[in-house]
Amino acid sequence: MKTEETRALVERYLEARAANDAPALDALLTDDVEWHLPRSAGAGPFAGRPQVVEALTGGVSGKLFDLSTMKRDAWKVIVDGDTAAVQQRLTATTLQGAEYVNEYCWIYTCRDGKVARLVEYADTLHAGRVLGFVK
């Protein structure tokens, strides 16, 4: 894919993700999409559009956060050809009522006008401490 096409696709993806819009996300992902989280996150990988859409729209986050409080703020999007890197901040309230703030980097690989691979990087030690998994 060309850089401009990838940028437009990833921007549509970010909008759909911010709105937690499962039908829009479904339309933006390839059938064989993969989502890889940091190994230390203890979740995933997820493969196939139905599984990835479910995981993205609450299957993972819904077990940890009050989804109505989640906000993503993408402040840097770098695109080259079929690949985009997005730096963003996630804020939310945990199901235990704690404030959660963490920074993430997502790498998107696109193919045939859709997102084919998502790789997520985050400070899982910080996340584990806030969520009570790590002391």
Image (tube, rainbow, N blue to C red):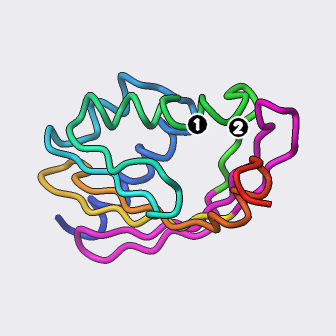
Tell me the residue that label 1 is attached to.
Answer: 61
Extreme residue in the top direction = 23
29 vs 37, left or right, is: left
Extreme residue in the front direction: 135
Q: Position of residue 126 (x, y in %)?
A: 73, 64
Q: Give the spatial CA distance, label 2 vs label 1.
A: 9 Å
Please tell me how crowded label 1 is: few (under 14), some (14-19), or many (20+) other residues with Cα within 10 Å.
Answer: some
* Image location of residue 89, percent across then percent down: 69, 58
Q: Earlier in the sequence, mark 2 or mark 1?
A: 1
Q: Quadrant of residue 96?
A: top right
Within the magenta stretch, is there residue 95?
Answer: yes
**Drawn side of residue 89 relative to residue 117, left or right:** right
Q: Which amino acid does label 1 sit on?
A: Ser
Neighbour tally class for label 2: few under 14, some 14-19, many 20 plus, Cα within 10 Å = some
Name the residue rendered at 30%, 65% in the picture.
Answer: 4
Q: What element carries label 1?
A: helix
- Image vertical order of residue 5 relative to residue 99, above or below: below
**Is residue 3 shown above or below 37?**
below
Q: In what quadrant of the picture does the N terminus appear?
A: bottom left
Percent across and percent down for residue 54 are 39, 28
- Callout 2: SS: loop
Residue at image point 66% right, 36% down = 64
Marks 2 and 1: CB-CB under 8 Å? yes
User: x%, y% of residue 19?
Assistant: 56, 30
> What are the residue bounds of the magenta stretch?
74-102
Q: Residue 110 carries which label?
A: none
Q: Which label belongs to residue 70?
A: 2
